[in-house]
Amino acid sequence: MATINTNPQAVDEVLSRAVNEVIDQDSLRSKLLSGKQLRIKLGIDPTGPQLHIGRSIPLLKLRDFADLGHQVVLIVGDFTGQIGDTSDKDAERPMLTEEQVHKNSAGYMEQLGLILDLSKTEVVHNSDWLASLTFREIAGLADAFSVHEFTERDVIKRRIDAGKRVNMRELLYPIMQGYDSIAIKADVEIGGTDQRFNMLAGRILTKQAGMPAQDIVMTELVSGSDGSKMSTSRGNTVLLTAEPNEMFGAIMSVRDELIIPYFTYMTRVPMTDVLAYTKQLETGTNPRDVKLLLAKALVGMYHDAAAATAAEEHFVSVFSQGEQPLEMLKVKVKAEPTELSAILVEIKAAASKSAAKRLIEQGAVRIDGAALTEPDALITPHDGMVVNVGKRTWRRLII
């Protein structure tokens, strides 16, 4: 049995840092101070192959609970990922095939291991229990909810009011996520504020099953580098696996008002330091100086201190002085005509084809120094070709 940290200050920081709401605050705090080991649940659907720093917020919170000595349970939603959660979507999400979900999750453990100690993490897949549920069992679970409760959710109500389709499959998702809590005997569920309805479903269903109603810790959501919703398709986020120089440059491009939220939500720099940085910004310190500290902290988290220092030196010498880097990531490609937007995705200079098209149309893409603005332009790579996206992304193509 792990030793449980019941220090009130440590418990209160876990319940406050990057946390938007706790249900039930008094109940959960009392349990954490009791010394009893709790089972803490977080589910992640593999709807894409790569995780970005926005996803790190609930993962870091899961790690916080592990550091207190509690048993953390990570649910890989290989079944729910096929069904699709539309909690944060303005349109219905298409179903994924089992093959697509498995392909997406292939590299998840390596990425999750950048944040979690997997040797202390119970990793499960919800297809193990959801795939075998009968219609009778599903009907029994569904009996706990009304259609009115589902349609009154903000995101669903907006779609209905706008005349957009809401399919019956979407009603099943909260039930499945809630059943996950029964299957793994969750005491606590972690998730972003967009998951509120789904996590409350788990609270209802655990109680219906004769278990103590799970408590809920809702983590904050954070905007992407451009100030809009963080999304891989928008190209405004940073992948956990980004190269040190690319990650550093991406963080340096975020808006100044995001510096403190990023420090608070996505790092574990001591809050005393974060409060000091807040005061510095309020009293006139150049935001760039504090942002350098943020970028260095994040690169150090996902690489190491030496890589963070080297990335800082690279940023100052290249981007501050406008030089082309002497060293850049080399990527092997084929010397055959390919759409420019597809090339950017292939060499990982853009997260998706839609993000690539947006960057090209904005004039952010250069090849061998020449700006290109046609996403569908056919480009035949040559050995040594330099592709530059914005101020921070450079690739040298190798044939």
Image: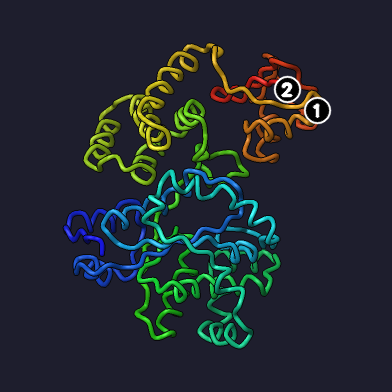
Judged left or right of residue 222, residue 377 is right
Between the residue at mark 1 and the residue at mark 2, the CA separation in whole angstroms equals: 8 Å
- According to the image, label 2 marks what residue? 372
Q: Quadrant of residue 170?
A: bottom right
The residue under the point 56% across, 58% down is 45
Q: Position of residue 300 (x, y in %)?
A: 38, 32
Q: What element carries label 2?
A: loop
Q: Earlier in the sequence, mark 1 or mark 2?
A: 2
Q: Residue at x 44, y 71 (%)?
A: 184
Q: Quadrant of residue 133?
A: bottom right
The residue identified by callout 1 is 377
Quick one: SS at disc 1?
loop
x 66%, y 40%: residue: 352
Up-down relation of residue 91 to residue 346 (above or below): below
Query: Type of residue at label 1?
Result: Ala
- Nearer to me, 369 or 314: 314
What is the tally of numbered marks visible in this picture?
2
Residue 128 in the figure: left or right of residue 377: left
Mark 1 surroundings within 10 Å by alpha-carbon count, few (fewer than 14), some (14 through 19), many (20 or more): some
Q: Do the residues labelled 1 and 2 touch (CB within 8 Å)?
A: yes
Q: In this view, does 72 lie above or below 177?
A: above
Residue 172 against residue 298 in the figure, above or below: below
Task: List x then y, in percent, for residue 91.
Answer: 66, 60
Quadrant of the image for the N terminus? bottom left
Q: Nearer the viewer, residue 375 or 58?
A: 58
Left or right position of 74 against 350: left
Of residue 361 and residue 134, the one placed in the foreground of this image is 134
